[in-house]
Image (spheres, rainbow, N blue to C red):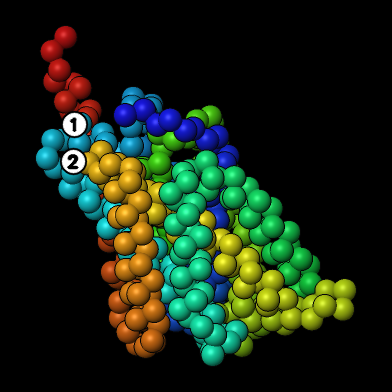
């Protein structure tokens, strides 16, 4: 079925940008390694190249089926197996939404206020995201534009405030301990990147210069992450490797025009970007089930999934060891590779094979 609403490519990629940066700013030495954060700049560059390689099957399918998502194409070309593809994507977005909410709650409770009400924060943020997902992709995209501007201005203010604290002697030689941290960082960034899966499901809603938008979005995230890592190393030095969330520590030590501790601004930006990420995931789930579930029932399904996601995130963040066990890179990476690379390539191959065998 042809989508009734279309958004521009750049509106869509504002959404993807925000979806990626909220997880990028939760990096720490436990996930990336304790040797040299600067090496991870090359991890993000490696992911930038990888995204361009694995998005090619999606661009090809979108050119041939401009009004169908990847799950819809799979259902049309692969029969019953195609419904399994839709289920995989739906489960994936549910898991990543829960992971994102859990990471933010961990950030909030470990840095800002351990006595903060997790319940109210999780319910409010998820409720706002659910409202956006129910209203549709146009609502999410419009909110993304506003939040993107606020995010750039806010993080720009934090980086400017940190500039006097840059100490170049904290910088370490690149690849001093080999390339292990580059590969480890690449796997972490890949495991947390939902861009390909989101494009696979939401591509029929996008019109305009998709390739250029994808390049600008991926390049923008890479540039932002590189700047963030530079400030983490040059301002915090070895202290960065002792922090649970070094990006938050940066914001807490910054001041501008007499205003000290911009950590409240940082948390506010995180909240807004998290809402966009969860809303994108919920809307993607809605698209996955749209061919078998009526609109009113979809709203009920999304509400139920949101409630389960909140409960699970709260349960996970009760115990740090529990969170570490459930959300390991080793678990998330295969799911991201499956939805972002393997399934698009498989659907493209099946479609190409059937097209070649079709009688002329």
How many residues crowd mark 1 within 10 Å: few (<14), some (14–19), many (20+)?
some
Residue 347 in sight: no
Left or right: residue 293 versus residue 258 is left
- Residue at 58% over, 50% down: 144
When the figure is inspected, residue 338 is found, relative to residue 100, above or below; the finding is above
- Residue at 29% over, 48% down: 297
**Residue under pointer 2:** 82
Give the quarter of the figure containing the C terminus. Answer: top left
Q: Position of residue 18 (x, y in %)?
A: 55, 56
Q: CA distance from mark 2 to mark 1?
A: 8 Å
- Residue at 40% over, 41% down: 202
Left or right: residue 247 versus residue 193 is right
Residue, far right: 257
Residue, far top: 360
When the figure is inspected, residue 216 is found, relative to residue 131, above or below; the finding is above
Callout 1: SS: helix
The label shown at residue 77 is 1
Decide which of 195, 268 is in the foreground and name it: 268
When the figure is inspected, residue 80 is found, relative to residue 63, above or below; the finding is below
- Which comes sooner in the sequence, label 2 or label 1? 1
Q: Quadrant of residue 155?
A: bottom right
When the figure is inspected, residue 347 is found, relative to residue 89, above or below; the finding is above
Residue 227 in sight: yes
């Amino acid at each position: 079925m042809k989508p009734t609403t279309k958004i521009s490519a750049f509106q869509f990629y504002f959404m993807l940008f925000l979806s990626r940066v909220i997880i990028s700013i939760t990096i720490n030495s436990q996930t990336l390694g304790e040797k040299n954060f600067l090496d991870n700049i090359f991890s993000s560059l490696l992911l930038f190249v990888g995204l361009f390689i694995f998005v090619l099957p999606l661009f090809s399918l979108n050119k041939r089926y401009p009004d169908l998502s990847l799950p819809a194409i799979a259902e049309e070309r692969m029969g019953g197996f195609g419904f399994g593809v839709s289920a995989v994507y739906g489960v994936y977005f549910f898991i990543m939404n829960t992971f994102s909410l859990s990471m933010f709650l961990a950030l909030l409770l470990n840095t800002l206020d351990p006595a903060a009400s997790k319940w109210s924060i999780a319910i409010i943020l998820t409720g706002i995201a659910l409202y956006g997902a129910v209203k549709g992709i146009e609502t999410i995209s419009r909110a993304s534009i506003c939040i993107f501007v606020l995010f750039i201005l806010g993080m720009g203010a934090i980086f400017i405030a940190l500039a006097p604290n840059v100490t170049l002697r904290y910088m370490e030689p690149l690849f001093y301990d080999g390339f292990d941290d580059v590969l480890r960082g690449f796997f972490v960034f890949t495991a947390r990147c939902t861009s390909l899966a989101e494009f696979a499901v939401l591509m029929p809603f996008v019109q305009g210069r998709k390739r250029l938008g994808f390049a600008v979005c991926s390049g923008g995230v890479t540039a932002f992450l590189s700047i963030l890592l530079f400030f983490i190393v040059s301002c915090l030095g070895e202290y960065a490797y002792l922090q649970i969330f070094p990006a938050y520590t940066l914001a807490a030590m910054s001041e501008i025009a007499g205003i000290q501790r911009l950590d409240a601004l940082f948390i506010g930006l995180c909240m807004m970007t998290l809402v966009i990420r969860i809303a994108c995931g919920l809307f993607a789930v809605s698209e996955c089930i749209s061919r078998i579930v009526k609109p009113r029932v979809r709203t009920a399904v999304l509400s139920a999934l949101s409630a389960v996601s909140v409960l699970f995130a709260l349960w996970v963040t009760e115990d740090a060891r529990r969170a570490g066990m459930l959300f390991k890179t080793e678990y998330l990476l295969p799911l991201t590779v499956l939805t972002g690379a393997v399934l698009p390539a498989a659907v493209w191959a099946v479609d190409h094979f059937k097209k070649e065998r079709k009688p002329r």
